[in-house]
Image: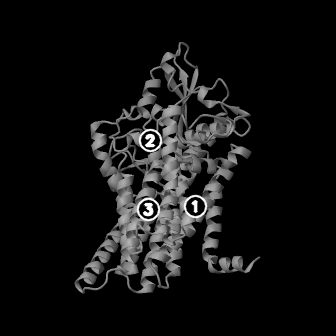
C-alpha cells in the first residue's frame, strides 16, 4: 500500500466507512426486480443492447441520448443479465464516487472553515436522500444525470478540466437534461471565472484550448442527433422540450392536469419528504447571501470574495437547474428532479449556518434533519406532505397520492410513488402471491389496467418469483386477461384478481363480478404492507 493510498484512507476514513454502510444497505434491497418504466429500461433496452452486435445507438434508453450511462450500467448484463445485485452494485459505486465529489464541493463553497463533521453529515444526507435511494433500484437515466452532474461540477470548480471534460461527456450522453445542465454550468462557470479573476480573456491560448475541449461533447451530441434523424430515422426527446404534454403517449392528460403540473412539480421539489425543511433554510441561505452582498456594496468593498462569489455561483446554478428541470412537462415522477436535490442540500446548509452560528447547536439541528430524512427512506412520515398531496392506504401504512394534485395517469401513481423505498413492497408482495398460488400456463390473472403490464411479465418457475431471467421461466404476461378479457370467447373458469395498492381496483373488480362469483379473498402481508387477491369462479 503506497503512502498516497494510506493518506487517502486516513483523510477520508469517515466517508469510506459511510460508503461501506451504504453498500450494505443497497445489498439488502438488491433482490428487487424493477417495475414500470424501469422494467422497460432494463428488460427491453439493456437486454436488446447487450444481445445485438455492439452499436452505440442500441444503448439509448428509448428516444433519450443516453449511450454513455446506459452502456456503463449494462456491463454486468454481458455476464449475467438477470443479476440485479451486480446492476445495483455498479450504480451504488458510481453514487459513492459522486458522494466524494459532493464532499469536495462543500469544501469549495465553505473554504477555510473547520466543518468536516458537518460535511460528513451532509454527505450522508446526499447518499441516503430518499428519492435518490429509491431510484437506485428503479433504473432510469435521471439517476445518472445526478451522479455525473455532481462529479462534473466538482472537477470543474477544482479546475481539473480534463476530468471535468470526461465527466461532462458522460453527463451529456445520459439524458437531454444532462446536456442542458452541462451547457448552463459551463457558461455560468465562465462568468464566475471572469468575475472573480478577470483572467477569462478571448486572446488567451489556454481559453481556446479550454473551449475546444468542452465543445467536444456538444459536437458529438449534434452528430448523434443528425445520424438519428438522417440515417436511422429515429426521434429524440429534445423535439418535445417545452411542449405541454401533447405527445401521443400522454393523451390521457386533460387541460386540468396540464395546468396543475407546474404546481405539482414545485411541491415535489420543495415540499416532498420533509423537503420543506430544506426549502425553509434554503430561503434563509439565499437571504443571508443577499444581505452580505448588499452590505459589501454599501461599504464599497470589493465583492470579488470567494465566499460571496461561490455562494452566488451555487444559487444561480440552482435557479438555472430548476428552470431546466421544469421545461419539459410530463408525469410527476420525483426522479426528474434528482439533480436539484444536492444543490438544495448545499443551500440548506448555508441557511443553517446563518441561523445557528454556534457550532454545537448547528450540528444538533443538522443531525436531527439527517435522521428524519434517513427514516423517511422507509416510511412516509412527513405530515405536511400528507396534507398537501393526500394519501392512500398500503395495508396499515399511508403513502402519498402523488397523482392527486394533477389527476394524471395512472391510479395513485406508478413511477410517481418512487419517492422512498416503500414502493418496493409491491415486488415482495407479488412474490408472496406467486409462491402461494403457484401459477402455471393455464392460470388466469387480472388487475386494473392502469397498473400497466410491467409488474407481472416473467416468473422463475423454480422459485415462483418475478425475474429478469429469460430461461426457466413462465411468461406471466401470457396469463394476463386484463386487456383481452372482452375478446375471450371462452372465459377462464377461475381467475385471480390482484388488487394492487397503488390503484383503486374495486371498479375493475366489479366488472369481473358480472361474470364471476368470489370464491376466496386472501390478504398477503409484508411488514404491514398488504395486497388482496380475489379468487373468482365463473358463474354458471
Task: Say which label, 2 or 3, has the lower sequence index.
Answer: 3
The mark closer to the camera, 3 or 1, is 3
Q: Residues within 10 Å of mark 1 (few under 14, many from 20)?
A: many
Q: Residues within 10 Å of mark 2 (few under 14, many from 20)?
A: some
Specify the quadrant of the image occupied by residue 23: bottom right
Q: Secondary structure at mark 3?
A: helix
The answer to whether residue 386 is left or right of residue 360 is left
User: For residue 237, which numbered disc appears in the image?
Assistant: 2
The mark closer to the camera, 1 or 2, is 2
> In this view of the protein, can residue 64 be seen by the observer?
no
Task: Say which label, 1 or 2, has the lower sequence index.
Answer: 1
Q: Quadrant of the N terminus?
A: bottom right
> In this view of the protein, can residue 193 be seen by the observer?
yes
Residue 478: image location, x then y, percent: 61, 26
> Residue reaching furthest top?
489
What residue appears at the point 51 percent right and 71 percent down from the top-left corner? Answer: 159
Q: Secondary structure at mark 2?
A: helix
Label 2 – label 3 distance at C-alpha:
22 Å
User: For residue 186, which numbered disc appears in the image?
Assistant: 3
The answer to whether residue 86 is left or right of residue 377 is right
- CB contact under 8 Å: marks 2 and 3: no
Q: Secondary structure at mark 1?
A: helix
Residue in front for this viewpoint, 174 or 378? 174
**Residue 310 drawn above or below residue 509:** below
Residue 473: image location, x then y, percent: 70, 33
User: For residue 95, which numbered disc appears in the image?
Assistant: 1
The answer to whether residue 341 is left or right of residue 282 is right
Amino acid at each position: 500500500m503506497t503512502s498516497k493510498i494510506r493518506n487517502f484512507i486516513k483523510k477520508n476514513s469517515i466517508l469510506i466507512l459511510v460508503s461501506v454502510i451504504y453498500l450494505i444497505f443497497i445489498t439488502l434491497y438488491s433482490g428487487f426486480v424493477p417495475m414500470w418504466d424501469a422494467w422497460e429500461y432494463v428488460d427491453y433496452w439493456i437486454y436488446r443492447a447487450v444481445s445485438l452486435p455492439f452499436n452505440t445507438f442500441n444503448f439509448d434508453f428509448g428516444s433519450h441520448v443516453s449511450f454513455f450511462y446506459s452502456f456503463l450500467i449494462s456491463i454486468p448484463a454481458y455476464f449475467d443479465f438477470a443479476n440485479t445485485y451486480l446492476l445495483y452494485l455498479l450504480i451504488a459505486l458510481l453514487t459513492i464516487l459522486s458522494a466524494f465529489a459532493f464532499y469536495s464541493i462543500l469544501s469549495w463553497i465553505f473554504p477555510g472553515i473547520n466543518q468536516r463533521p458537518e460535511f460528513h453529515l451532509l454527505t450522508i444526507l446526499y447518499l441516503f436522500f430518499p428519492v435518490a435511494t429509491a431510484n437506485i433500484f428503479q433504473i432510469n437515466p435521471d439517476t445518472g444525470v445526478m451522479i455525473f452532474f455532481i462529479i462534473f461540477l466538482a472537477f470543474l470548480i477544482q479546475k481539473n478540466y480534463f476530468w471535468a471534460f470526461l465527466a461532462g461527456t458522460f453527463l451529456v450522453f445520459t439524458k437531454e437534461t444532462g446536456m442542458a445542465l452541462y451547457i448552463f454550468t459551463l457558461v455560468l462557470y465562465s462568468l464566475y471565472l471572469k468575475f472573480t479573476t478577470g483572467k477569462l480573456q478571448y486572446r488567451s491560448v489556454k481559453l481556446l484550448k479550454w473551449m475546444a475541449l468542452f465543445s467536444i461533447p456538444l459536437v458529438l451530441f449534434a452528430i448523434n442527433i443528425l445520424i438519428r434523424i438522417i440515417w436511422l430515422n429515429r426521434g429524440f426527446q429534445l423535439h418535445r422540450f417545452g411542449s405541454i404534454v401533447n405527445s401521443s403517449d400522454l393523451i390521457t392528460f386533460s387541460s386540468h392536469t396540464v395546468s396543475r403540473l407546474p404546481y405539482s412539480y414545485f411541491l415535489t421539489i420543495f415540499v416532498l419528504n420533509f423537503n420543506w425543511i430544506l426549502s425553509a433554510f434554503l430561503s434563509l441561505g439565499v437571504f443571508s447571501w443577499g444581505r452580505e452582498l448588499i452590505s459589501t456594496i454599501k461599504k464599497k468593498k470589493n465583492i470579488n470574495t470567494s465566499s460571496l462569489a461561490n455562494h452566488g455561483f451555487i444559487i444561480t446554478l440552482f435557479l438555472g437547474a430548476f428552470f431546466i428541470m421544469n421545461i419539459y412537462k410530463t408525469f410527476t415522477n420525483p426522479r426528474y428532479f434528482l439533480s436539484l436535490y444536492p444543490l438544495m442540500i448545499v443551500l440548506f446548509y448555508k441557511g443553517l449556518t446563518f441561523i445557528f452560528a454556534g457550532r454545537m447547536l448547528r450540528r444538533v439541528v443538522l443531525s436531527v434533519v439527517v435522521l428524519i430524512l434517513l427514516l423517511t427512506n422507509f416510511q412516509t412520515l412527513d405530515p405536511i406532505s400528507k396534507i398537501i398531496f393526500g394519501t392512500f392506504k398500503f395495508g396499515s401504512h399511508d403513502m402519498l397520492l402523488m397523482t392527486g394534485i394533477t389527476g394524471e395517469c395512472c391510479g395513485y401513481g406508478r413511477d410517481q410513488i418512487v419517492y422512498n423505498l416503500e414502493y418496493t413492497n409491491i415486488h415482495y408482495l407479488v412474490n408472496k402471491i406467486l409462491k402461494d398460488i403457484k401459477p402455471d400456463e393455464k392460470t388466469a390473472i387480472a388487475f386494473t389496467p392502469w397498473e400497466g403490464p410491467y409488474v407481472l411479465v416473467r416468473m422463475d418457475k423454480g422459485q415462483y418469483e418475478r425475474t429478469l431471467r429469460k430461461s426457466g421461466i413462465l411468461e406471466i404476461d401470457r396469463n394476463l386477461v386484463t386487456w383481452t378479457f372482452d375478446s375471450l370467447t371462452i372465459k377462464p373458469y377461475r381467475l385471480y384478481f390482484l388488487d394492487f395498492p397503488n390503484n383503486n381496483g374495486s371498479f375493475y373488480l366489479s366488472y369481473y363480478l358480472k361474470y364471476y362469483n368470489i370464491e376466496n379473498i386472501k390478504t398477503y402481508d409484508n411488514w404491514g404492507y398488504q395486497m388482496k387477491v380475489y379468487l373468482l369462479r365463473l358463474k354458471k
